[in-house]
Image (tube, rainbow, N blue to C red):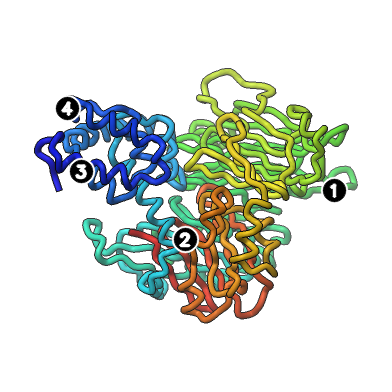
Amino acid sequence: MSCAHPQSNGCRDDLKAVLASLHDGAHCSRVIVLGLFHLPTMQHIPELVIERVAVYADTSSLVLLASCNRHLRQCIRRQQRVWQQRYRAQHSLDVDEEMRWLQWHIKTLRPSASIDWFRALCHRRACNANWFKNDPGQLKDVEEVAARSRRRVTVLDRVFFLDPASLNGCHVMEHCQSSIASSTRRYWRTFRPYCSDVVRNITAHGNYPMSDAFLAIAANSATSSTDRGGYVDLLVWPAHRIASMEPRRLSYPNCTYYGIHGRWLLFYTEEVHALDDAEGKTRFVHIMDLATGRSSQFHVDSMPSHAFLQRVTEDAATVLLAFYGAMGVHWPVNWSLWQFSLSQVDGHHPRCLVQGSFNIARLFIDLNIQRLDNDRFIVVHANRNVSEEQEKLNGEILTLAVIATQHDGHARFVDSQPPLWARNIPIIVAKEMPIHNRIVAYSGVAWTVYSLDDGNLLSSVSTHAIAPSIEQLCNVSTADYLYNVAPYIDSIVLHPSKDNRSLLGVDFMRPERTGRRRLAHVFEHYRIDADKSLLVECSARRGTPSAWEVGRRSDGRLMIAICTMHALHIRFGNRWRVMDLSI
């Protein structure tokens, strides 16, 4: 469909169809109509129109928009390269690249923004909607590939699944395409990492999506356990040769694996040695460039409680370390950001860029510190027993905070960096909604949504508001699970239905929509109750798994792994299948 004359009646009808399909955007329809239909030409589109369509349009609306305003589409395509260059200048390659692209465009969108952003947003929304499509054709087999016999194909997604007991139980799944120019032949295949040695007691990684250039795990091998007591092996494979070559073996004393990002590997070692008739310990944090094999280490007084690669580029990496302090009136946590570069490795000490501290009120076991993006990390301290008086102590103690680590690497050292914002509120669980730049916190009595930018309270919904829907539609015997887990898809929590044949999408921000979304076909296919399923969510940004067990454990439980937005990986017994969410 196309329009030679933008102001023709046919084009107006098509644009009205676009507006009619905008979800939750009816309150601004009059402004959009005025912006579109009272212009002398369609070559000057108001920014409001672009933003509203970007937020609310589905795929079919986008097609109509492109056909009705070909001039705008052509102008936008010419700007695409400029936008991508700006994006690359501000952000390094991240694990979830599309999510970073969306976040950046949401903040910087202008009328000349790339139309690929519309497509990417619609694509992600369509994949999320396909959770509840219940099409039997979505459930697909996984091809088993013999070791060292993989065909050369284009790999679109790669996921690693862990068996802590042995490397023989671990496997990699790849979403493959036979030709880079065609999407007609796409399939999932699986294989095991190749290693001739006996490898057991794997401590890292968990199940996670692999977009890095390497796979690395920490484990005890037959060699390390017999000849070198206390040593742990780091096994490293290039991502494209996991099934065909022996891993590089790096052995260290009492090694703790922290993470891998791109070509950089982060880990900790602790060596025990004799010191004046007593035992002493030497502790180091290590960073290694896996592409060149060069590494650097620096001494620490104690083992970091949290450590992760905050930002990486081709020639540099920044590492965030957090340590527990000595207990006083409160429990302090000290953090610091360190820079490594290729010119500094092999013996050179890294440079500290930023440091700061914050206080919490209870034991450290409930503290969670996670990377949010290249320039921020988030602190969540689960504590439901915060009184109204304690809530007023923002700045002294906290349960929720976002802290900035932005530093160009050349500026002066920053001491005592305060949080961007902090709250001392009751929290049982919290989860980011990065596509909306928000975080939702559950306190036991309400779900509250805050802005990730400034911590402003955006909305709050009491549990009493959704209680009638839960009692009417959901399995009351497992209702406690609803209040102790984080949402999975935006503001939607999956919960067993009353008949136990499906998982219902409970939208705690829109209680009236509860029951409209059901994940049912999987349970029909396997003939298993929904409360016998186990959902495992794998964070693409952090590479660490978390699990929500819907019902009691049983030998016949069904595991659904959420590792990539394009598929759900389903294991029943020893057999794996994939539920395709792609469009």
Taking 582 as reference, is 72 above or below it?
A: above
- Marks 2 and 4, how far apart at CA: 49 Å
Residue 142 appears left or right of 114 = right
Residue 530 to residue 268: above or below: below
Which label sits in the foreground, 2 or 3?
Answer: 3
Which residue is labeled 3 in the image? Answer: 13
Amino acid type shown at disc 2: Val
Who comes first in sequence, dot 2 or dot 4?
Answer: 4
Frontmost residue, 212 versus 476: 476
Tags 2 and 4 in contact by the CB under 8 Å rule?
no
Res 364 quadrant in image:
top right
The kind of secondary structure element at disc 3 is helix
Classify residue 394 as left or right of residue 31: right
**Circle 1 SS class:** strand
Identity, as a three-letter code, of the amino acid under mark 1? Glu
The tag earlier along the polypeptide, 4 or 3, is: 3
First along the sequence among labels 2 and 3: 3
Specify few, some or many for label 1: CA neighbours under 10 Å numbering under 14, 14-19, or 20 or more: few
Q: Which mark is residue 159?
A: 2
Mark 3: which amino acid?
A: Asp
- Dot 2 or dot 1: first in sequence order is 2
Q: Quadrant of residue 504?
A: bottom right
Please give the residue where the numbered disc 1 appears in the rendered image: 279
Disc on the earlier residue, 1 or 4: 4
Q: Amino acid at mark 4?
A: Thr
